[in-house]
Image (tube, rainbow, N blue to C red):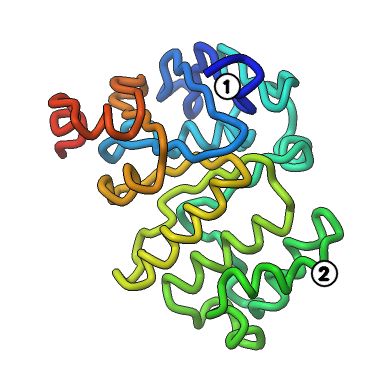
Amino acid sequence: MSEHEAILKVDKLCSGYGRSQVLFGIDLACPNKGSIALLGRNGSGKSTFLKTLVGELKSTKGSISFDGAEVQGEATEKRVRRGIGYVPQENAVFASLSVRENLALGAAVKRSDSDIDMVLDFFPKLGARLKFQAGTLSGGERKMLAIGRALLGKPKLLLLDEPTEGVWIGVIEEIADRLTLLAKDMALIIVEQHVELALRVCGHAYVMDRGTIALSGTASEVRDNPKLVRFLAP
């Protein structure tokens, strides 16, 4: 990947929680358009990496270059306004608010009220649930709502932490199809436990192990690497 093709470049990134270091010198590049899968067993540092990218955790070493600017040290709000969207693994929607109210909050980031209809076209299931509290939605509907709300911020890069966790199999395929469509027009980094699905949706993959990048390459290269099973085993 050449310099001008990468919207995100991470170099020697280190991060963690207090005195507990979790990430050790992560190098990663993400193209302007397309999706990257971030794989690895639980505790390998995947969620910590996403939180560090969006600024929820402070990095201790290394650099994060996004859209040509160094963003390490910037507040989360500023990174979001630059175009980094984030859908966390848990508590991604406001359960006591309606679907419409959740979307309105997302639209307020870029004053994009008119784009709510676009989200409803993209995720038709939400259109029938606009007046319902988000907490009453199914797991799949909550994931769709969280992704849709993030899209209303018009991100250039969307970080998704376990977008199919707790989702019924039929809805998993629907979400996977939508992510494939999104990747044609923007950049995605997807943390996902469904390895086959992730490698089908994403063009490239990075496999983490103990806070480092253990494998990387195209999705097919990573899928065919005999070391993959070892790095994913519990």
Residue appearing at x 47%, y 16% in the figure: 27
- Residue occupied by mark 2: 114
Q: Residue at x 66, y 68 (%)?
A: 119
- For label 1, count other residues whose C-alpha is less than 10 Å away and answer few (under 14), some (14-19) or many (20+): many
Secondary element type, mark 1: strand
Question: Does 213 sit left or right of 127 as displayed?
Answer: left
| Disc 2 versus disc 1: nearer the observer | 2
> Is residue 208 positioned above or below 63 on the image?
below
Amino acid at circle 2 = Ser
Residue receiving disc 1: 59
Closer to the camera in the image, 12 or 216? 216
Count of marks placed on residues: 2
- Disc 2 element: helix
Q: Position of residue 110 (x, y in %)?
A: 83, 54
Q: Decide if residue 153 is on the left or right side of residue 142.
A: right
Which x, y percent locates residue 180? 47, 52
Percent from the top left, x then y, of residue 225? 19, 26
Which residue is painted at 56% across and 52% down in the image?
182
Q: Which residue type carries mark 1?
A: Ser
Sequence-earlier tag: 2 or 1? 1
